Image: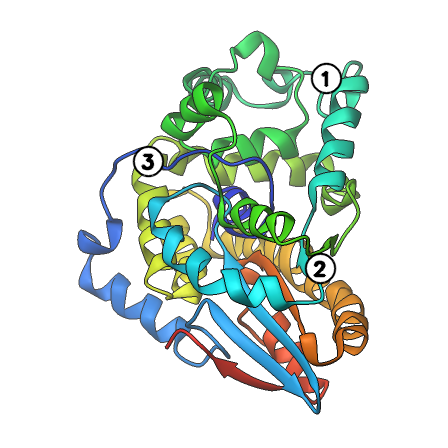
């Protein structure tokens, strides 16, 4: 999948917006051979489908839910189902809890250089004229004029390209309207259940550390074509999420990039490998130790863990990693 949209919707937590935007589900209009290729690429991926699972080892129990970080009325049945589970749990674990989100917001407000490069060459100086024109228009549609975009750090620009203009407008008008993570945090707080974070507030900055200047620009280039139909893209991926067809979200992005990004298949695969390693696999592995410790401490009360849905499946997904630790995995929403 495009690094940007995968990150924004299904792997990186953050403030959410009501998904009141409309668009076309691109699975319904794509060529049949592309749909077949996506299905084939997804078929053998462990735990490719499902949003709600239980991991059990002896008397230890972890309830795991894959989340979507933007608000949608379709979250409510999952919230209702998990309300008693959370109320009985020892703790709720999320990617970033309220304290970490507050620290991140404070850091961004006090140190603009986290997102803005005040000294280096600007993006219009680094990109071709055509690339800069397309980027400036796309970012203006998302509420950030070119004069501001010019100094933004490429990783942040790439993330913004993955959020549709409609979602950006809704965030500005409504603010946090309830991604599943935030809804479950609210349930835990109402039940006086501790909310704990799986990673530190500044994790996002390390995810993009060490990129070469050209790799930074490739993140933007990979996201630019889909930025023009981001509403359709977001609807497509969101519908797949609520169908529980999680890994198809990933492979849809790969094959869409093959067809529309203008990059070679090799370049697309490099972007995909980078995204999977940095945004998913490495973080998944880092979460296992705190989850194991939490399950041991919880006793028969168990714990609930809620994080972006794309962290669940795959050979290095959280479910496979827990299975490697001796947990029996059961899907609860199938």
Q: Is residue 241 left or right of residue 159?
A: left
Mark 2 vs 3: CB contact within 8 A: no
Q: Position of residue 243 (x, y in %)?
A: 32, 63
- Looking at this view, is 111 or 282 the one in front? 111
Dot 1 or dot 2: first in sequence order is 1
**Quick check: can you spot residue 309?**
no
Q: Residue at x 77, y 75 (%)?
A: 292
Local SS, label 2: helix
Residue beneath label 3, please?
231
Q: Position of residue 211 (x, y in %)?
A: 74, 42
Q: Residue at x 41, y 21 (%)?
A: 169
User: Mark 3 packing: few (<14 Cα in 10 Å), some, or many (20+)?
Assistant: many
As drawn, the label of residue 121 is: 1
Q: Position of residue 153 (x, y in %)?
A: 68, 26
- Looking at this view, is 162 or 260 the one in front? 162
Outermost residue on the front side: it is 191
Colouring used for the render: rainbow
Local SS, label 1: loop
78 over 116 or under it: above or below: below
- Looking at this view, is 246 or 159 the one in front? 246
Local SS, label 3: helix
Q: Is residue 320 left or right of residue 287?
A: left
Q: CA distance from mark 2 to mark 3?
A: 28 Å
Dot 2 or dot 3: first in sequence order is 3
Q: Residue at x 71, y 59 (%)?
A: 283
Q: Quadrant of residue 219?
A: top right
Q: CA distance from mark 1 to mark 3?
A: 31 Å
- Looking at this view, is 162 or 197 the one in front? 197
Residue beneath label 2, please?
283
178 over 175 or under it: above or below: below
């Amino acid at each position: 999948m495009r690094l940007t949209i995968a990150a924004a919707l299904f792997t990186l937590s953050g403030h959410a917006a009501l998904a009141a935007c409309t668009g076309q589900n691109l699975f319904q209009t794509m060529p049949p051979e592309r749909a077949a290729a996506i299905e084939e690429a997804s078929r053998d991926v462990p735990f490719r489908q499902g949003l709600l699972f239980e991991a059990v080892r002896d008397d230890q129990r972890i309830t795991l839910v894959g989340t979507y970080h933007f608000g949608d009325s379709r979250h409510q049945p999952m919230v209702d189902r998990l309300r008693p589970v959370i109320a009985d749990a020892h703790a709720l674990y999320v990617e970033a809890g309220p304290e970490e989100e507050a620290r991140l917001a404070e850091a961004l407000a006090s140190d603009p250089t986290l997102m803005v490069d005040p000294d280096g060459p600007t993006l219009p100086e680094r990109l071709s004229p055509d690339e800069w024109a397309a980027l400036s228009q796309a970012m203006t549609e998302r509420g950030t004029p070119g004069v501001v975009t010019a100094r933004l750090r490429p990783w942040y620009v790439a993330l913004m390209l993955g959020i549709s203009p409609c979602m950006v407008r809704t965030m500005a008008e409504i603010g946090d309207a309830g991604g599943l993570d935030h809804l479950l945090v609210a349930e835990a707080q109402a039940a006086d259940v501790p909310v704990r974070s799986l990673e530190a507030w500044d994790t996002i900055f390390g995810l993009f550390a060490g990129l070469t200047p050209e790799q930074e620009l490739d993140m933007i280039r990979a996201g630019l074509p889909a930025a023009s139909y981001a509403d359709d893209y977001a609807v497509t991926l969101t519908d797949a999420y609520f169908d529980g067809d999680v890994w198809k979200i990933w492979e849809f992005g790969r094959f869409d990039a093959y067809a529309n990004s203008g990059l070679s298949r090799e370049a697309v695969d490099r972007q995909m490998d980078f995204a999977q390693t940095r945004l998913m696999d490495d973080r998944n592995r880092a979460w296992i130790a705190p989850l194991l410790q939490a399950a041991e401490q919880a006793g028969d009360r168990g714990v609930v863990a809620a994080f972006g849905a794309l962290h669940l499946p795959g050979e290095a997904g959280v479910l496979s990693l827990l299975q490697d630790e001796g947990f029996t995995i059961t899907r609860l929403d199938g």
